[in-house]
Amino acid sequence: MYDFSLLPEETVRAMIVALVLFLVSFLSFVIISLYTLINTSIYSKEHKEKLKLICDVAYFHERGKRNNQEDSIYISPLDMIEENGFVAACSDGMGGLLNGEVVSKFVTDSLFEHYPYKFNAQAENAKIISDISDKVYEEYHLSAGATLVMVHIFDDYMNFYSLGDSNIILIRNNRATILNQKQNYITLMIKKYAEGGIDTIDAYRDSRARGLIDFVGNHKCKVQMTSKPMRLIENDIIIVSSDGVTDSMPLNRIVSHIHADQNATGIARTIKYGVRASKNAKQDNYSAVVIKMNRSFV
């Protein structure tokens, strides 16, 4: 133990002054830190809805057991989001028909050529898709076709467009919902069976169940679209995918495998490896664009 009584009086006074200054500085630091933290928290709470949502984007594009990759994806230029919004699409060439990979690539190339899209012109955008479908029909006369799912995000809102049975999935608060209605026979049969009081499980056993009733390549197709934009919130996850994803990784598995703190790249990687781990002997090609909505102070 030190005997401070042996120190010169001037030294003791200097040490006391230094200790007092240190305590004052430390208390000042604590007060300033608390003040900043409290004010930042209050500002964030008061202005959270005014902060812009930004799109964190990733994708995967994998070939399953098919000989060709018949999926095609489109992602609009990220440096044009501020002015024109963000567009993502996935087109899946129809199995059993000719030139699936050619048609799906034609669809996404055509979407690229028509960018940018007007956000509040849903009917006009649907007409662009319908015209693309008519061009495929004129070339192949129903011997080739593809599905299409497309989202258009601008600030805090999203429109979507759909033809066929690919997926637009929204994950919010740990719950997953497919936003678009699949345009296949099973949808019609379920409605018909339900109206007739028949057990709808029989619809799934019908050999025609997965046959499409509308698609890119059908003449004068009916494009599904949002009648008005839907509001997005922080941490929403949007997955724009071919049905090869959900065939092997159902919605409940997707939700159980991803975590709220993952970014888009982590979510895409988790889903991709989840599909691969299912070891589906008839695995279709599987592709998806993953979008996570984050708030930004910028």
Image: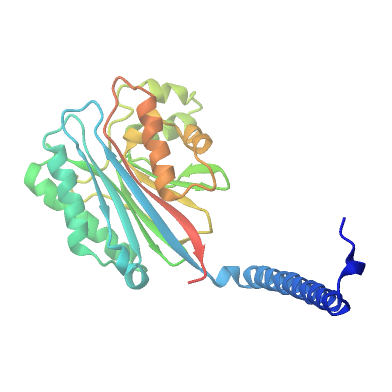
Does any portion of residue 188 appear in the rendered image? no
Residue 52 horizontal side relative to residue 240, left or right: right
40 relative to 261, above or below: below
Residue 112 horizontal side relative to residue 274, left or right: left
Q: Where's the N terminus, which quadrant?
A: bottom right
Q: Which of 265 and 156 is in front in this view?
A: 265
137 relative to 5, above or below: above
- Colour scheme of this structure image? rainbow
- Residue drawn at the location 16% of the way across and 38% of the way down: 100
Does any portion of residue 274 appear in the rendered image? yes
Residue 99 horizontal side relative to residue 16, left or right: left
Counting from the top left corner in percent of width and height, residue 150 is at 32, 53
Q: Nearer the viewer, residue 78 or 240?
A: 78
Counting from the top left corner in percent of width and height, residue 78 is at 31, 63
- Residue drawn at the location 17% of the way across and 56% of the way down: 110
Q: Disc count in the image?
A: 0
Residue 42 horizontal side relative to residue 273, left or right: right
Counting from the top left corner in percent of width and height, residue 65 is at 23, 25
- Residue drawn at the location 46% of the way across and 23% of the way down: 201
Query: In the orientation shown, which residue stands out farthest toward the left?
Result: 139
Counting from the top left corner in percent of width and height, residue 42 is at 69, 71
